Amino acid sequence: NQVERKPSAPSSSMAKVIASNTASPTAVPVTDTEVTEPALDFGNGDDFGDGWGDGDGWGSGGGGGASFFNQKVKAERICFVIDYSASMRGKRFELLKVELARSVGALPASIEYQLVFFAGPAWVAGCDLQMNGRDSAEVKYDGKNYQWVGKDAYNWSTENNKLPTPLWLKATNKNLKKSLEIIEETKLVFGTAWKAPLEMALDMEPQPDIIFFMTDGSCGGKSAQIAEEIAKKAKKKDIVINAIAMMSPSARDAMGSLAEITGGQFSMVDESGKSNVLIKGQDDK
């Protein structure tokens, strides 16, 4: 059976014709939608890896994931404590800058981060650092001045041993881009003193979940003592320290203890740039 559809009423048909042929007295605006491309130059080419993550849930899509020299972690707050001493020059420095830029550039928006650089003095990356010869420096940060004095390459301190407290940065596009510029532009300076920069990271508020600590050398005859002291403070606060030794077997034992005591990872980076994880963190065992 077929049902014959009744035609529309003449008045309705005429209304449609009139509507389609009569200019509307009211102007209806049409909104143009402009789609802008991100103004960042990292994370989408070969300079700093293969993009914003590694496809395994780490990087910007990993909900709090990050990696550095093949060490993968999950955290809400990460502090990078990085050796910018003169002994890092050459291939080591180029390798560090590429890997640090890749790691920082891939941080997801959910993470808070900070960069602390050290040699003899220690400073928050991007603040005003003025070296006065080899054995003294002035650091300006958060409206305060810190005078550094060094007895030798390994023993540096500030007046009254007061240290700056780094402030957390949110992983916004603006902050990440600025951090990449700082990583590339900061110069190497004299000295290798571990204790102050690690204490600066430990004293942050809120405290970090993970500290990535990278250096290319020991800090003299007290390396083991300093490592044990810092590790005990970190463990008491439940802060994990992941240590990376850049082509430096002399720092292996002390840095290994930093990681082992705090439940972190320890890696050695060889001359080819390959990172070998020697101690796995508690979450990876």
Image: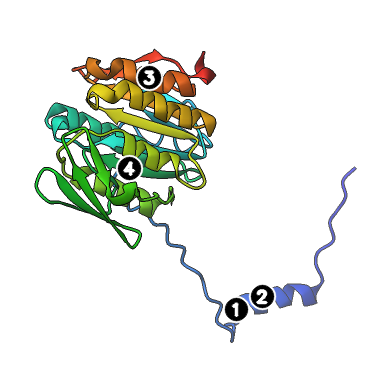
Q: Earlier in the sequence, mark 3 or mark 4?
A: 4
Mark pair 2, 3: CA separation: 79 Å
Mark 1 Cα-neighbour bin, 10 Å: few <14, some 14–19, many ≥20? few
Q: Amino acid at mark 2?
A: Val
- In front: label 2 or label 3: 3
Q: Amino acid at mark 4?
A: Val
Q: Residue furthest left?
A: 133
In the rendered image, which residue does mark 2 sit on? 17
Q: Earlier in the sequence, mark 2 or mark 3?
A: 2
| Cβ–Cβ under 8 Å for marks 3 and 4 | no
In the rendered image, which residue does mark 3 sit on? 266
Q: Position of residue 141 (x, y in %)?
A: 31, 56
- In front: label 3 or label 1: 3
**Residue at point 51%, 71% (across, down):** 30
Between 135 and 180, the one nearer to me in the picture: 135
Mark 2 Cα-neighbour bin, 10 Å: few <14, some 14–19, many ≥20? few
Numbered disc 1: secondary structure: helix
Between 129 and 152, the one nearer to me in the picture: 152
Q: Amino acid at mark 1?
A: Asn
Mark pair 1, 4: CA separation: 70 Å
In the rendered image, which residue does mark 4 sit on? 116
Numbered disc 2: secondary structure: helix
**Relative horizontal placement of residue 79, taking residue 23 as reference (left or right):** left
- Give residue 21's mark: 1
**Residue at point 49%, 21% (across, down):** 263
**Relative horizontal placement of residue 121, taking residue 104 as reference (left or right):** left
Mark pair 2, 4: CA separation: 73 Å
Mark pair 3, 4: CA separation: 19 Å
Q: Position of residue 8 (x, y in %)?
A: 80, 67
